[in-house]
Image: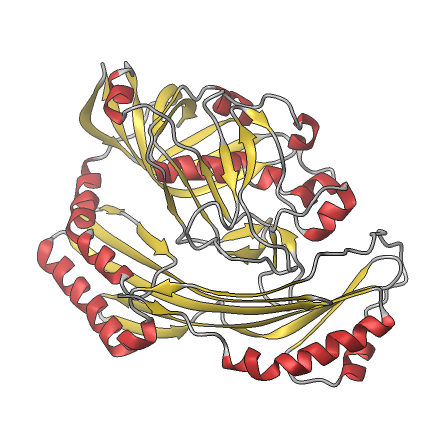
């Protein structure tokens, strides 16, 4: 059984007024569009001695209009009902006196369509009391499982995203729900404290709690195992990346670096390598809202461009960047449906959606057997990339030692991995067939403009410097 995500009553009731507004704007401007948003969600947090129910940081309701004034584009946002003349005055107030980048008028084919997703259990059907009770039960079971547990932090968040886009003959509406969960046991023996972060996410509802329950005991046991972890000796190693760490590599190595607004600003080295080899022939990278079904999925972006599946790297060759509408107009390329706003109050940028390596044909056991001295890296903590110089750095929670083709049972934690992007991608020598993605975090554009997206891949074998 499944339940359909409901469309927004607010957007439905305001639709006719939005249509009148766009028609009025088009009498003054060569291009006019409106994006209206109605996003609502709740976050539940449970730990030792504490429970919290909070509004989601992704909650928003409001509108942004964009017009072409003969030179470029202007925008104005508002979160209350305004008459068309009031919106026109807002737009007049956005005219700047400095030099502006010129853009052509964007024209898209007419399209009227609505989409909505389905989940197994809508959070509102489960009810907040039931969700909270399940998290409390998981907490109590974790403490019963381990005497070394100092704390366990559980989180569950579900957000319903509903958006309406209008522009001339284009009228698009979508309603979908994503959820994410986290399970973080913290164990302590003497002065040594360790933790594991197990993440869950997807275009799912409260059924995600079942997945969390299924991994509870295994995650607590892993945290206990990390109390025995040592340190890695710095050096170059053959490594196998778990799908989660492969996703970190995809996101940092060829994610931010192929956002096309970075090409326009001259901040990404990848722009000089279009059509050139940048990786092993085993490497194919995808990015797109329709490339996978995860938290970075949607039917149309915040500029009214339909989402798709962009192959950024194909068999080692850099094929395309991912673009918002304005960067595509500046570059003379079709927009790829990656124009995304943190909220209706923020600017649209080229942003990743679902970023991942395609699978290969190798088996994990064969990849392990091929390594004389190296590590299987699992669970990421953080990552950072320099798109201009192609430097890469990531922090991995732990690695499992491989010696003479076998896992030794020894763990090292934490592990810092660094490399030069073409060298790392060029060293990929094997990939398993199954691909998985995770999307429990959020990604910033520099130090701000946070966005939900997912990342992943298969198990990958490559070479990295570890420390």
In the image, is residue 106 above or below residue 120? above
Residue 61 percent location from the top left of the image: 56, 76
- Residue 269 placement (x, y as % from top left): 66, 31
State which quadrant residue 225 falls in: top left
Q: Is residue 193 left or right of residue 435?
A: left
User: Which residue appears at 20% of the width and 68% of the height?
Assistant: 134
Residue 129 in the image: state x and y as whole percent: 25, 78
**Count of all numbered marks drawn on residues in the image:** 0
**Scheme by which the image is coloured:** secondary structure
Residue 1 appearing in the image:
yes
- Residue 190 in view here: no
Q: Position of residue 147 (x, y in %)?
A: 10, 54
| Residue drawn at the location 86% of the way across and 72% of the way down | 28
**Residue toward you, 20 or 96:** 20
- Quadrant of residue 345 within the rendered picture: bottom right
Please tell me whether residue 354 is drawn above or below residue 425 in the rendered image.
Answer: below
**Identity of the residue drawn at 41% across and 35% down:** 246
- Location of the C terminus (image quadrant): top left
Seen at 82% across and 52% down, the residue is 103
Q: Is residue 429 above or below residue 185?
A: above
Tell me the quarter of the image containing the N terminus. bottom left
Q: Nearer the viewer, residue 403 or 214?
A: 214
Question: In screen coordinates, is 280 left or right of 274?
Answer: left
In the visual, does 158 lie left or right of 387? left
């Amino acid at each position: 059984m499944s339940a359909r995500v409901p469309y927004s009553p607010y957007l439905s009731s305001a639709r006719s007024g939005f249509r009148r507004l766009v028609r009025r704007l088009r009498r003054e401007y060569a291009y006019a569009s409106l994006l209206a948003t109605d996003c609502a969600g709740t976050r539940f947090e449970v730990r030792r001695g504490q429970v919290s129910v909070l509004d989601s940081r992704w909650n928003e309701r409001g509108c942004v209009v964009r017009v072409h004034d003969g030179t470029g584009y202007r925008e104005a946002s508002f979160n209350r009902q305004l008459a068309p003349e009031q919106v026109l005055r807002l737009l007049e107030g956005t005219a700047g006196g400095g030099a502006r980048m010129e853009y052509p008028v964007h024209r898209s084919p007419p399209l009227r369509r609505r989409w909505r997703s389905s989940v197994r259990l809508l959070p509102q059907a489960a009810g907040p009391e039931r969700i909270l009770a399940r998290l409390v039960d998981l907490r109590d079971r974790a403490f019963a499982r381990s005497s070394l547990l100092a704390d366990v932090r559980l989180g569950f968040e579900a957000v319903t995203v509903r958006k309406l886009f209008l522009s001339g003959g284009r009228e698009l509406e979508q309603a979908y729900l994503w959820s994410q969960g986290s399970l973080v046991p913290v164990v302590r023996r003497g002065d040594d404290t360790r933790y594991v972060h197990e993440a869950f996410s997807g275009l799912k509802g409260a059924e995600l709690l079942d997945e969390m329950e299924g991994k509870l005991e295994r995650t607590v046991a892993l945290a206990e195992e990390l109390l025995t972890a040592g340190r890695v000796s710095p050096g170059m190693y053959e490594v196998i990346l778990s799908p989660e760490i492969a996703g970190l590599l995809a996101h940092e190595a060829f994610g931010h670096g192929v956002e096309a607004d970075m090409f326009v600003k001259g901040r990404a080295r990848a722009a000089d390598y279009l059509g050139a080899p940048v990786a092993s022939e085993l490497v194919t990278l995808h990015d797109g809202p329709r490339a996978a079904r995860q938290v970075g999925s949607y039917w149309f972006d915040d500029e009214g461009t339909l989402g798709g599946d962009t192959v950024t790297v194909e068999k080692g060759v850099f094929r395309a960047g991912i673009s918002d509408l304005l960067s595509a107009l500046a570059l003379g390329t079709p927009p790829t449906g990656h124009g995304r706003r943190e909220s209706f109050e923020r600017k649209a940028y080229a942003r990743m959606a679902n970023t991942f390596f395609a699978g290969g044909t190798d088996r994990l056991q064969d990849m392990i057997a091929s390594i004389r001295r190296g590590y299987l890296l699992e669970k990421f903590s953080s990552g950072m990339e320099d798109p201009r110089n192609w430097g890469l750095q990531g922090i991995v929670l732990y690695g499992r030692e491989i010696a003479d083709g076998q896992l030794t049972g020894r763990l090292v934690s934490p592990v810092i991995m660094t490399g030069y992007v073409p060298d790392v991608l060029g060293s990929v020598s094997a990939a398993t067939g199954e691909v998985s993605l995770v999307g429990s975090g959020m990604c910033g554009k520099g130090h701000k403009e946070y966005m939900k997206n997912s990342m992943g891949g298969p198990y990958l074998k490559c070479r990295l410097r570890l420390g």
